Image: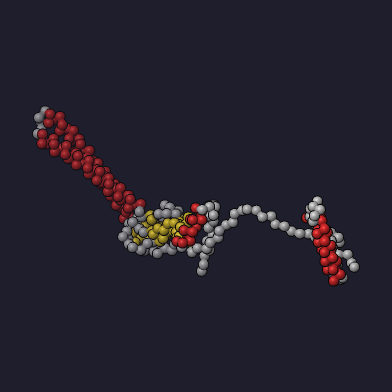
């Protein structure tokens, strides 16, 4: 009878117990006979022992069980929407002279997108500036007349009514200066609106108008649309029952609250 692989069981048994020594010896004899029978049934086999070769111990593996945490993965339908969407519209009337952006590119807030013909608005601003200067000159003349009338009315060289009228005309001239200054600011604002800026930072879409097109301040069609996609809103839909179960689990310490990792998949 050929010698087969032996199994080392001395380390697994406590031989200090005299009561169980006979049973353990019997088990060892049975295992030794089984190993010999297996070797005799396959005489052509060259496998002897485990990793250590002939007469070596059998190699076994083990797994250490430790307490840890595992992520909860759940697939939910969601919809991604832009953080900001802005339709660009003109605020003055005129003809588009130039388009100053590339469609589909990133534009920044305040960047000029379109140039409207500013000729008429430049003329209006110049006229408003001239009106302000004329009003200031009239106001200066009215104040000078009122100042001259003041000592004369004290000397009773003129009537009090003439002095009152002179003071009123001076105040009206000052009001005319304020009115013309406001008209000048309005003309300057319209002049600045001939350059159509980007209201937000984002990706600009297609242009709905071309160079030479006439645009108006009250038109409903937007010149173009800017979309801000950084960051974005993600609207996740979850059943009320599932949400309630998750809240109850968190409250009962069945789950430990931690970081939420969101992974988006686009389904076509």
Q: Where residue 99 appears, x then y in whole percent?
A: 42, 59
Q: Where residue 192 appears, x then y in whole percent?
A: 35, 52
Q: Where residue 182 appears, x then y in whole percent?
A: 27, 46
Residue that appears at 35% across and 63% down: 221
Residue that appears at 88% across and 64% down: 3
The outermost residue toward the top is 155
The outermost residue toward the right is 1
Quick one: quadrant of the N terminus? bottom right
Q: Nearer the viewer, residue 255 or 123?
A: 255
Asked if residue 5 is positioned above or below residue 66 in the image, the reply reads: below
Q: Where residue 165 appears, x then y in whole percent?
A: 13, 38
* Residue 26 in which image quadrant: bottom right
Q: Using residue 185 as the reference point, say whether residue 110 is left or right of it.
A: right
**One can see residue 144 in this view:** yes
Q: Nearer the viewer, residue 179 or 40?
A: 40
* Residue 115 in which image quadrant: bottom left
Q: How is the image coloured?
A: secondary structure
Residue that appears at 83% across and 68% down: 38
Q: Using residue 119 as the reference point, say whether residue 152 is left or right of it.
A: left
Number of numbered labels in the structure image: 0
Q: Using residue 126 as the reference point, say whether residue 79 is left or right of it.
A: right
Q: Nearer the viewer, residue 261 or 187?
A: 261
* Residue 207 in which image quadrant: bottom left
């Amino acid at each position: 009878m050929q010698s087969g692989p032996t199994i080392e069981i001395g380390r697994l048994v406590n031989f200090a117990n005299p009561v169980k020594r006979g049973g353990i010896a019997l088990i060892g004899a049975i295992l030794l006979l089984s190993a010999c029978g297996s070797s005799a049934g396959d005489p052509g086999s060259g496998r002897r022992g485990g990793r250590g070769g002939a007469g070596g111990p059998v190699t076994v593996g083990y797994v250490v069980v430790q307490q840890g945490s595992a992520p909860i993965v759940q697939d939910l339908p969601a919809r991604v929407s832009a953080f900001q969407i802005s339709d660009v519209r003109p605020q003055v009337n005129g003809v588009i002279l130039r388009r100053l952006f590339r469609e589909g590119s990133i534009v920044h807030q305040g960047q000029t997108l379109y140039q409207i013909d500013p000729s008429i608005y430049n003329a209006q601003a110049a006229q408003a500036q001239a009106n302000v200067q004329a009003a200031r000159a009239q106001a200066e003349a009215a104040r000078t007349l009122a100042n001259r009338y003041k000592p004369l009315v004290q000397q009773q060289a003129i009537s009090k009514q003439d002095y009152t009228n002179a003071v009123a005309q001076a105040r009206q001239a000052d009001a005319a200066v304020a009115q013309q200054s406001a008209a000048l600011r309005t003309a300057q604002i319209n002049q600045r609106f001939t350059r159509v800026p980007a209201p937000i930072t984002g990706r600009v879409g297609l242009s709905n108008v071309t160079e030479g097109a006439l645009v108006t301040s009250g038109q409903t069609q937007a010149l173009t649309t800017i979309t801000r996609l950084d960051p974005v809103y993600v609207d996740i839909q979850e059943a009320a029952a599932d949400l309630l179960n998750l809240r109850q689990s968190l409250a009962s310490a069945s789950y430990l609250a931690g970081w939420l990792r969101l992974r988006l998949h686009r389904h076509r």
